[in-house]
Image (cartoon, grey):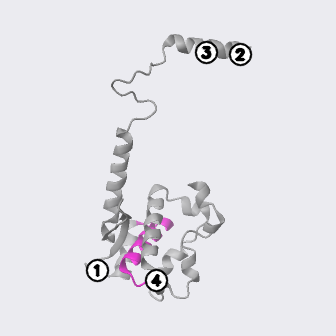
Amino acid sequence: MSAFLRRPIFDQGPLSFVESAPSIAALDTTRLQRLLVAYYRLLCANRLIPAELGWPASALSALFVESNSHSDRAVRWLAIRCYAMHTGMAEGERAKLEKSILGEGEEEALMWYSERVDRTSVFVDATVLPALELKRVHETRQVIAASPDFYTREDGDSTPFLSDSDLRCAFFLLVSRNM
């Protein structure tokens, strides 16, 4: 992942095209939502990545500042969340920023979340993203923990374990080779 993110195309981050766009409001909403969900997931995994790679936070803020912000509520909400994580903003400050940009209304912020196996898109309200992500990560970890790996023996597996004599023999061969 590190090698991929260090490619020259990402020198200024995955959203570098935002600031150079003639009209931020005209940028494709679904593309921005997908990129912002990926950015959010990346930040959840490691909040230090943007700093390590020198990505500016200005592309994120450009999506929600009032003078030229994107018109989609979910894009603005996601951009604020990513901006807060990117800059290390305190929770209270993030909440104030959300309130000042989005207001206090219960207006829905419908966004693209994922794709099913049959390639149909899944849309959710952006405000449930943190809970959905926690659930997604938890379920993925459960699947990984439950799946057999190299060290796991299943019932009926005839593969023998290494015995103490096998280890002594291997140690002897290693020692005698180095003498």
> Which amino acid does the dot numbered 3 rest on?
Phe
Q: What residue appears at the point 65 percent right and 14 percent down from the top-left corner? A: 173
Q: Disc 3 on helix, strand or loop?
A: helix
Circle 1 is placed at which residue position?
104
Quadrant in which the N terminus is drawn:
bottom right
> Which amino acid does the dot numbered 4 rest on?
Val
Q: Disc 4 on helix, strand or loop?
A: loop
Circle 2 is placed at which residue position?
177
Circle 4 is placed at which residue position?
65
For mark 3, does the 10 Å Cα neighbourhood hold few (<14), some (14 to 19), or many (20 or more) residues?
A: few
Choose mark 4 or mark 2, whichever is in front.
Answer: 2
Q: Disc 1 on helix, strand or loop?
A: loop
- How far apart marks 4 and 2 lie (CA) works out to 68 Å
Residue 69 to residue 12: above or below: below
Choose mark 1 or mark 3, whichever is in front.
Answer: 3
| Residue 51 lies in the magenta stretch | no
| Residue 73 lies in the magenta stretch | yes
Q: Are marks 4 and 1 in contact (CB under 8 Å)?
A: no
> Which amino acid does the dot numbered 1 rest on?
Glu
Q: What residue appears at the point 49 percent right and 59 percent down from the top-left corner? A: 47
Q: Earlier in the sequence, mark 4 or mark 3?
A: 4
Q: Earlier in the sequence, mark 4 or mark 1?
A: 4
In the image, the segment drawn in magenta is 70-90
Of residue 122 and residue 164, the one placed in the foreground of this image is 122
* Image-quadrant location for residue 110: bottom left
